[in-house]
Image (cartoon, rainbow, N blue to C red):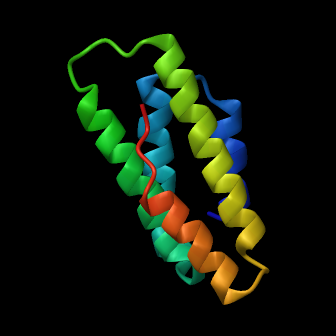
Amino acid sequence: MTLNELYEGLKQRDRGMAAFDRFMQDCRSGIESDRAHAAAYHLLLSITARFCDRYDREPLPLTTAQEAKDALLRLTDQARAAETRSADEQIRVLNAIATTELG
């Protein structure tokens, strides 16, 4: 799993809970297979898990789901773009992910 594969996988999925569950599985896979970027996968997993917990056994409005998916796509895109940038830029992106709340 790479950050690019993570991004492309989410981009192709619907915006329902199954897509978020699969995204979290992909993040877990990335933590194991792409250790150089494990922090990004872990933070993306964490914010997605909090979002899913919030809507556990409750209806997920389509607009909320789409906004969350769009936010995850933006953050994942930023993380993959930062892979080749300076450590300061990578930390800035990681901090942005860590402070994001979906939905």
| Residue 14 visible within the image | yes
At a point 41% along the width and 44% down the height, the residue shown is 101
Residue 67: x and y in percent read 56, 27
Q: Work out whether residue 96 or residue 68 is closer to the camera in this orientation and state it.
A: 96
At a point 44% along the width and 28% down the height, the residue shown is 18
Indicate the quadrant where residue 70 lies: top right
Q: Residue furthest left?
A: 57
At a point 63% along the width and 29% down the height, the residue shown is 13
Q: Quadrant of the N terminus?
A: bottom right
Residue 15 to residue 1: above or below: above
Residue 8: x and y in percent read 73, 45
Residue 81 to residue 5: above or below: below
Q: Residue furthest bottom?
A: 87
Residue 94: x and y in percent read 53, 69
Q: Is residue 15 left or right of residue 78?
A: left
Residue 32: x and y in percent read 47, 73
Q: Quadrant of the C terminus?
A: top left
| Residue 6 visible within the image | no
At a point 62% along the width and 52% down the height, the residue shown is 75
Q: Work out whether residue 100 or residue 28 is closer to the camera in this orientation and state it.
A: 100
Q: Is residue 3 left or right of residue 49?
A: right
Residue 48 to residue 66: above or below: below
